[in-house]
Image (cartoon, grey):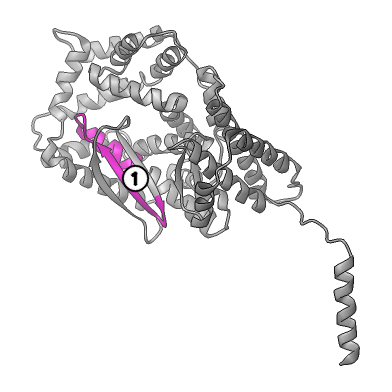
Amino acid sequence: MRILALSFLLMLGACATAPVPAPADSLDRIAANYVALILEIGEREPGYVDAYYGPPEWQEAAQAHPRELPALADGAAALTARLNAVSVSGADAATVQRRKYLLAHVAAASARLRMLSGETMSFADEAEALFGIRPDLLPLSAYDPVLAEIDALVPGPGSLIDRVTAFKAAFVIPADRLESVLAAAIAECRARTAAHITLPANERFTLSLVGDKPWSGYNYYLGDAASRIEINADFPIHTERAIDLGCHEGYPGHHVYNALLERTFVRERGWVEMSVYPLFSPMSFVAEGSANYGIDLAFPGDESARYEAAVLAPLAGIADADFAKKARLGALMRRLARAEYTIADDFLSGREARDETIARLARYSLTTPDKAAQRLRFIETYRSYVINYGLGRDTVQAWVERQGADHWAAMETLLSSQILPVDLK
């Protein structure tokens, strides 16, 4: 016993005098520091953190002691240097992608911090810096042939906007039936998604109607496979929009995306970087693009029009409406979507005034001036974020369809991954 005790004392002495090597850096340590960075940026810019469901004490620390913008910028630069110094030689593909994913999101955070500090960028430069992909900005005249096709589809006296508005008025869901129609649409979106993707057993959401928002719908992901879905009821909602919102905000859109990321990375792997969602990041390009493509995936071809006519129209009290023609109109209007990028670029750069911008938005989205003004409010709030919808949908669709015949399997892979916009091209 005395010999063992003496040996133990000698070991303690050796430990006390020998230098202790610094622990090697790791992606896990960097990921934790990344979460802290994003949470602190969120304290400097309300709305920057779209979702967080990590340790509550991390959020409390960010709220109590957020760094100033210069210190946050230094912190982002330090994270980039650490990520570049971490070797992934010989690592599996998931670990290599994890490092790439963190580098891309720290770069986006750095760009956002520069913007918060006063730096201005062009629309395309900003989109690329924040979301990891560069949009093409076509002249508005490139979209005029589409307007001509719509003009032929909806003929008659009056302006094209007035004719389209009058035609679509037949599909407006009455306010007193809106919740029941939305609930039915979301339930159908969920059933179609659950037939192909295994959802977390405890996934759920709440639905509420709100007003005075710059957006038409929003999913607030709460963690533990739960979401709060809010729908802006300020403007008329048409039957196809009930399906769009049900798929986009819910199934297989934002709710499913966040729930699968939480299950795959946070619960199963302990990769804490996925417990926080910075809005202005490459994550949003995948999120919005997959949510929009999810509408077509769940309701391919003419299935949306048939479901509207058979189920939603009776619920909404709509009769004798031409759903097939409305579907053709919707397909044409989708081809106008990217006109908004050029309009936003001109407005945000100061080349076009507010009134002219509202008129252009009304013309190229074929909507009323008050609805166009709401869209301009969205552009002012979220700026180049608008690319994530149309360009995001088209990019996701092309990637999914390149993976093979089983589009649902490819979609599930995307929604459960750290795939970046650059990987989708």
Q: Quadrant of residue 240?
A: top left
Q: Front-most of 310 and 200?
A: 200
Q: Position of residue 92 (x, y in %)?
A: 68, 51
Report the number of discs.
1
- 26 sits to left or right of 39: right
Q: As drawn, which residue projects farthest toward the bottom?
A: 1
Q: Position of residue 334 (x, y in %)?
A: 34, 23
In the rendered view, would you say 11 is above or below 66? below
Q: Front-most of 114 and 371?
A: 114
Q: Secondary structure at mark 1?
A: helix
Which residue is painted at 48% across and 30% down in the image? 395
Q: Position of residue 406 (x, y in %)?
A: 45, 44
- 220 sits to left or right of 273: left
Q: Quadrant of residue 112?
A: top right
Which residue is painted at 10% across and 34% down in the image? 318
* Residue 240 in view here: yes
- 77 sits to left or right of 417: right
Range of the magenta residues? 222-251
Q: Magenta span has 74?
A: no
In the rendered view, would you say 77 is above or below 377? below
* Residue at numbered disc 1: 250
Q: Quadrant of residue 220?
A: top left
Which residue is painted at 13% across and 27% down in the image? 170
Local crowd at mark 1 within 10 Å, few (<14), some, or many (≥20)?
many
Which residue is painted at 40% across and 55% down in the image? 225
Q: Quadrant of the C terminus?
A: top right
Looking at numbered disc 1 in the image, what kind of residue is underneath it? Gly
Q: Front-most of 265 and 28?
A: 28
Q: Quadrant of the N terminus?
A: bottom right
Q: Position of residue 398 (x, y in %)?
A: 48, 31
- 244 sits to left or right of 312: right
* Residue 195 in view here: no
